[in-house]
Each structure stands twice: as C-alpha cells, then as structure tokens.
Image (tube, helix red, strand yellow):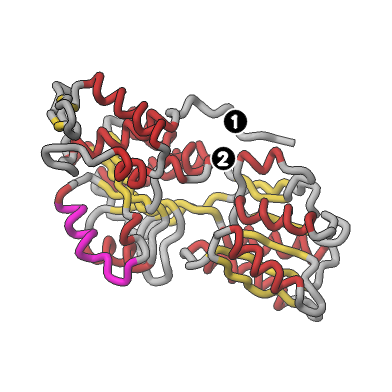
Amino acid sequence: MSHFPAIPHRPSLIEHAAKILRDALTLGTWAGYLPGERALSVQLHVSRPTLRAALVILDREGWFRSELGKRRAIIMPHCKPRPSPTRTIALLSPLPLTDLVSFAQVWTDSLREFLSKAGYELQIYLGRRWWHSLSPERELAALTEQNPAAVWVLFSGTERIQRWFEESSIPCVTSGSAHAGIQLPSVDLNHRATCRHAAGQFLSAGHQRVALMRQGPRNAGDFESEQGFLEAFCAKAGTHAWVVEHDGTPSGIQRKLDSALRGSPRPSGFFVTHAMPALLVASELIRRGINLPGDASIICRDTDLFLEYFSPSIARYRVDPLVHAMRLGRLVLQRASGSSSKNRLVRLVPQFHPGESM
C-alpha cells in the first residue's frame, strides 16, 4: 500500500496558538490589555496549559508588560513590519488550523512555503462566527477593507461568501469547488468522476442498495459528488442509491445510521464523503455485528492519515496534499499578477485505494 510522501515538520499546537495570537496582536484585535486566559482558550479552541505555553513564547518576544494583579498589557515589540498588501495572500477559513483535518493542514503549510519562495506572505483569517450566516456581506466588507491583500483564498466557502467575492471583484481563488453560476478559479477533486467511479465499485461488487452519507450543509463539491454517484445508479436497473445527510457529530451520525439500517431492505453499501464520519460508520457497523466486507461495504470519498490505523482498512480516494498546494499556489500567483482568467478550474484526479472494506 502506498503512503503519503514524507511530511515536513509542522508547527506544534503551542506554536499554532502563538502564531494565531501574534497575528491577532499585529492586527490590533485587542486594545490595551489581552483578554483573560479562559476567554482566550475558548476563542482559540485550545486547553489552558497550551494557551499558557503560547503566552510564554509571546512574553519572551516582548508583546506584553506584566502588571501585578492585572491582565497582560499589550505593547508592540520591535519586530519585522507587516508585509505590503501587494505581497500578502489572505486565506479565509471557517476553522483554526489546529481544527482542520491533516490533509488541509499539510496543503496549507505547503502553500505558505510555496508562496514564501515567490515573495508573498500567507495570512490566515477565521470566519467561524459568520461562515454560514445568511448575510455575511458586512463582515466580509469590513474584513477585506481592514486587511487588504493581493489575493484572497477561500477554504471552499458558502455560496453567499463566494458570490460576494465574485461581485466585489476582489481577486479570489477557491480551494474547493465554486458553486453553480459563480465564476471563481478553483482547485478541487474531480468529484463527479470520482463518485461515478465509487458507484461503479459498489455495483461491480453486487451492491444494489447504497447510502451516500454526507455532512450538511452541502458545499459545491458535495453537489457534484451526489450528481456523479446517483447518475451511475440511475443507469443501472434494479438498483437504488440515496443521500443520508448528518450533522457531523457522533450522535448525529449514529442516529442517521440507525435509521438507514432499520430500512427494509437495508443498505449493503455506504459511501461516506469525509474521513472522520467514515471511521465512525465503520466502527458502528462492526459494533452492531455487521462484518466488513462480508455483510456491508464502505468507501470514503476523502482520506486522512488516521485511516491508515483502522482495521479493516477503509477503501478511499487519495490526492497528494503537496500537489493540491502547488496547483493552488500557481492559480494564486496568476491572480496576483493580474491574470484575467476568472473561471479557470483545476480538477485533480485521486487514486483509489481498495482497502479491506470492499
């Protein structure tokens, strides 16, 4: 079985927390005093010990003045000046780097290195509070005005976020597919072809009833995934595939799985879009006495390193995150240079790893 190429050193959780704090301080997120440790640990989604270790790093760099019995007073140390907006690339993500799956962490770090070699600095901004807002326009306008950048990179992005960037004419590239009718350059898997291939694997193995389990709300790649998967089953008489949407939580996935298994006849195949839900589906099936692959089969559309340690190994599709970062970086540099190619689509073809769950 092939493996991902050797992964370069990635910052520890403490270093990530220090980086997020440093960026926020540089942007002037807090005035006068740093918030209390409890509030900060909640905002950064890290434990108090991790936060304290990160604060020690920033203390040494001279960001604070200690005042007995008071919160840390913020001072600006003698550090390198903030890069010019024309040499800054901004990445907008719904989650902190520490909460992303390892595939995303690797390509993000690789993108930072790729852009650095070209003379650009990658700045990361979090949009978690309003990512799925029905009206994110005001927040987006304030964010982009206060933090000008040569190009903005969207971590997939909802339809409203993508449409705002398209209509604002701010140079933008999407890591993930653009929604229907939106012309933004993007890098993603060829989801439609990939999922047609997955459907063919189930059909070839004799599965006539297969549930596609995905997390809501759908992103653009999920629309393409459903389209390709269901197309293949519609072309095969006597078979049936349907979509099961879950909320991404363990309890939510368990409820949906229970409901699917109570159906008559129940599905014998499960196509799961994300790695962590696929792991839970596999373990829950085994816990219920359903053997893999004798009684049921699983394929995961995406992958993550931890799937290597699950037995029986789960069939899945893989793309090298370094390739993703390089193709994304090239699109970003094209936009930064003033390229007018607004709707260039880069679609990567993943490699199928059969595993032992088929």
Residue depicted at 32% across the width and 63% down the height? 161
Among numbered discs 2 and 1, the one appearing first in the sequence: 1
As measured in the structure, the alpha-carbon distance from the residue carrying label 2 to the one carrying label 1 is 8 Å
Question: In this orientation, which residue lies closer to the viewer: 279 or 187?
Answer: 279
Instruction: Give the dominant element type of the magenta stretch: helix, strand or loop.
Output: helix
Quadrant occupied by the N terminus: top right
Residue carrying label 1: 5
Residue 239 lies, in percent from the top left, at 78, 77
Q: Amino acid at mark 1?
A: Pro
Q: Amino acid at mark 2?
A: Asp
Residue placed farthest to the top in the image? 60
The kind of secondary structure element at disc 1 is: loop
103 horizontally vs 78: left or right: right
26 horizontally vs 46: left or right: left
The kind of secondary structure element at disc 2 is: loop
**Residues drawn in magenta:** 133-145
